[in-house]
Image (cartoon, helix red, strand yellow):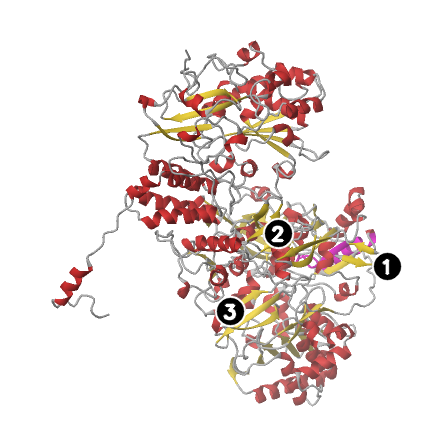
Amino acid sequence: MSKTFVHAPGFVAGDRPKIVSSRFEYADSHTLERFLATDGYKGLRAALTRPANEIHDDVKSATVLGRGGAGFPAGTKWGLTPQQVWPRYLVVNGDESEPGTYKDRLLMERDPHQLIEGCLIACYAAGLSQCFLYIRGEMAIAQERVALALNEAYEAGYVGKNILGSKFSVDIILHWGAGAYVVGEETALIESLEGNRGMPRLKPPFFPAANGLYGQPTIVNNVETLANLPWLLTHGVAAYSAIGTKTSPGTRMVAVSGHVKRPGVYEIINGTTTFRELIYGEEFCGGIRGGNALKAFVPGGGSAPWFTPDQLDLPFEASQIGPAGSMLGSGAVMVMDETTDIPAAALSLTHFYAHESCGKCTPCREGGTWLERILRRVVDGEGTDADLQQLLEVGAMICPGSFPHASNEKLGLTAVPFPYKMTTICFVGPSAFAPVHSALTLFRSEFEARVKKRVTIPVTAVAAGASVGSPVGASR
Amino acid sequence: MTIVDPVKENVVVDPNVVNLTINDKSVAARKGELIIAVADRTNDFIPRFCYHPRMTSVGMCRQCLVEVETPRGPMMVVSCMTPVAEGQIVRTATDSVKKAQEGVLELLLANHPLDCPVCDKGGECPLQDQAFSHGPGESRFVEEKRHYEKPIAISDIVYLDRERCILCDRCTRFADEVAGDALITFTSRGNDTQVLTFPDEPFSSYFSGNTVQICPVGALTAKPYRFKARPWDLEQIESTCTSCAVGCRTVVQSSRDELVRYQGVDIDPVNWGWLCDRGRYNFESVNSADRLTTPLIKNGPELVATSWSVALENSARIIRLALAQNANSVAILGGARGTNEDAFAWAMLADKLGINQRDAQFGDGLNPEIFNLAQATIDETCAASTIILLAPDLKEELPVLYLRLRDAAQKRKSRIIEFSAHDSGLTPYVWRNIGFEPGLQAQVVRESLSTPEFQEQCSRGQVVVVVGRGNLAENEVFTLQALAEVFAAVPTTKVLPVLRRGNVRGAIAAGLTPQKNAGDAIDILNAAAAGKIDCLILLGADPMSDVADAGLVQRAFTQVKNLISIDTMINKSNRSADVVLPAAAYGEKNGTTTNLEGRVSNVVQKINPRGTSRPDWMIATELSMVLGVDIGVSSLEDLNQKLVTLVPGFAPIADTKSTHGDGVLMARETPVTISSSSTKAADRNAYNYRLVVSRTMYDLAQSTISSPSLVGIITDSAIYVNPLDLARIGVVEGGSVRVGADGTNIVISIKADNRVHRGTAWLPFNHTGVDVRPLLNISGDVVDVRIEPIK
């Protein structure tokens, strides 16, 4: 039987292989004392005994996938930095703000030393001279615990000059965000870190690996990605690859929210666990609340196109989710049961993205708000049939061409694979459209039921009135 | 691009060229060039709002989306940020591109108020034009539009209408990237994003007018032009600005025979399309009601209107009488305001009459011998690896040259070594800033340039020294000495002379400079003060305001027997003249002007001269006929012909077309060298403050005080000291102090300024309120003052 912890809301334990959440069940998991008692900094010690390029090769051959959303292999990313350009930086993206996602928050709150150890291993392996840890502004406990852990680590000689007596030195600098979703996008995060407005830069030319923070080569990694490294270095590539599938090895933290019996963060086996297991499995969410039927779920954070029960048997494997019309994204599953008001749910998400637009690209700045306003009118019962069509047309100005969606047997829909085309720099604009498009494609009847039926004024009655001698509108 | 080597007959591939196709047309481009720029060359216009060729691309408006072929099929990219690549296939007008562009335009118009009928931009608006050419034709937006307070004043000159703004980042980018005055920026985000100033800090940039010019909608408007005309009522010609010596290329626009607007024209060698606000907006003075429309002659204590024939007769009589004494009893001051032709006509007349005492400078410039040194152009200066500044604050005096040098330091990695007695607008961008106490300039330059670090820097490539008069309270000798020190350290140095008056270089070249070892302006004034000048001719000159040594001018004007003034308005100097002849102003006459680097370009007439005023050259011609010494000129063409043949420097303008557009450089003579002298200023008493006196952009210049939009910007006189010195003097910021030198003293308010070095005090010249000139005795080497708090 699994148990939940008051001090770590959202985490649900279970008897599964644990790579990053192994210490979560201890009440003092965030302290150096507990960390050291449970193999802490063992991965770093192991790494420092070997040449850096071997560690890099390990990460490459273990295919540690990025856990931020795009799923790009970390080892490959590290290899993209130009040689012999100094200084070069590691930037840790702890600005987790995708709707539904809260796994990184738990990783920082419950095991900050694991993250610090991961940062150090990454800096050592990729030859990075300084690390910036960017933590979302709203995550007060995470900020506090990472800061405390960093102080402990500095004091104990794990961070700073000549780490553990070696020639390897790295400083970790903490930075709190100021509350903008778009800063989760790596180039916007770099802008924010430099002290500018959090607005994305266009890639090319600003691929961070070549031209990032202060114009220097910069690796931007997600918190969970780095949290995998201590275990990998302690237990070896073979042990890591033994979990999960070849293309998606290891485990993955998934945050489940919505209408399930036990919402929370679960460390699942990558590549094999299916959505059905996650939502209905006794060791995970334990089914829908009140025994209700599942209506739809979002498989990868608020910006992902939606799935319906038709897709429940898909596994957490990017190569299967993409063709099915969505993405795994940031590891957040949002579950909607049969009681869900679909247009209102779409509005809630679209409002978020319209509100979080940074204002740089016209289609997102103007189009996002436009979508929200039409949708609000529809939800309020003031919309018309033309408004439903208009929603899709505004979306087409942000994402020209066909937009991905899932297949649906009942509606006779075949899947349109991910990704989509876009007229904006980053994904905030398309994200405002994704929920609208999914909701309209899969649940159009709910919208149609909401729109105002046009009242047809009987023409004859007016004509009759006019004939009695009323001069209304007779001359202008 | 493949080039066939004519000698070896083999094919050479230029490594910097890439070949691509745009809409199936092959085109060669430079590596790194942006698709949008290449498409402009092939006439495949791509609509755009945020892209500006003189600024970094940001890809903000998304209007310039085009399709580029990739292995995964056509991909939509913004052409303003995508560089060309070998074999690239670009399509700018496919159905999906058109749809995307129409979509962006519809979105841009969604919240735009469409108040075109009352918008100054209506008729010349890129948003209007491109909505027509690349827009969907109709809008589906039925929601309520964004609302903001209609125009808010963000500076003394500029108004911002946030409803019209399409958030293209042009103005904010200009302010930050080009001008270096990041005083406007985006605030809020998403749909609430807006351009604003910081609270309580206006957009008081010297270059704010450029943001109005590059705004692609009517969001930014400028006070002098608001509601003055409709674009289709404007007539325009291309000309050259003569407000200072940079010589920015402009478009002069008029409506109903009145100047209404200047716009910058982008030419590579000079201004890149930018103008400063003073040059852009002082056209108001041409329209001023204070303009002279008829000649005036003295009648008792008053000046009364008269006819040209009477005025010319009177002038001739005065000159004849004076010449009857001897040729040295007549002198001419000024001429830098007019055209080369104006100056040359007067020089020819002076030659005929044997008048050798003439000077277009007023003791506030430098000896014209600097024009004979090896010269550099603005472009050569900006391309130099080392730029040495022995110059005034260029941001104040030659603003667009400041933009060019700032760009060179920021983007081209030229290194600037600044020697100055007072931090300038360029100081934040220089490689090394070496402060000196006035009088010690040469010594500091010599010592600095002899250090290994500076020697290494100067050996990296071309060195150009930018030389001008940085301090009116320091004898020009010290600057020339310092210049000689630079030549001694680096003999291959070239010089960019930065004398500030509009056409001072042209006037000097045409002959309005002391002849046959005659004295300069200060000598002339001294001679006048000694009663030796019977007739002083002022060619658009106002020595009473412009000459630093007020006492000297006062004495000279009291003693001089007769005064003839050729000017556009009544000023402090010609108030007491015997004859005032009304001159045509800028925009009212044709000719050529010469900028500080010796570039000759045309100035063109746009409107009719006010009243009976006429160009200076015409006045010289008519006067010569009345005097019976015909200079043989009956038209501007005659004059131009004579200028080209008689003054070798002007030979290149024989083809008048050469002065159009970029203009043409004067012929350079074989450079001479400069030799060092060893004047030394007396040591400063530690209780005293050594004065730095220099000009700012908005001072009591005639064209500024007669421009209603600018006159309010002029600040009151004050003395500025380093904050630490303020404490030493024992006064608070804004308090009054008594400033004394040589038995004269003035009471003035004092301010702290970090840019002022310790032990010196900075006095901006010619501001409103207290007249600081009684302190300035420019015959001395330097001016030391005592500053005492008033109890």
**B165, above or below A418, in the image:** below
User: Magenta segment range?
Assistant: B463-488
For the residues marked 1 and 3, what is the alpha-carbon distance in whole angstroms? 62 Å
Disc 2: CA contacts within 10 A as few (<14), some (14-19) or many (>=20): some
Q: Is residue B486 magenta?
A: yes
Q: Disc 3 sits on a residue from what chain?
A: B
Q: A214 or B779: which is nearer to us?
A: A214
| Residue ID for mark 2 | B425
* Residues at marks 3 and 2, CA–CA distance in whole angstroms: 27 Å
Residue B741 x, y percent position in the rendering: 62, 55
Q: Is residue B401 left or right of residue A423?
A: right
Residue A364 lies, in percent from the top left, at: 46, 45
Q: Nearer the viewer, residue B109 or A454?
A: A454
Quickly name the residue at label 1.
Answer: B9
**Crowd tier of the residue under label 3, counting other residues whose Cα lies within 10 Å: few below 14, some 14–19, many 20 or above:** many
- Look at the image and tell me whether residue B743 can be seen: no
- The chain holding disc 1 is B
Quarter of the image for residue B108 reads bottom left
Q: Nearer the viewer, mark 1 or mark 3?
A: 1
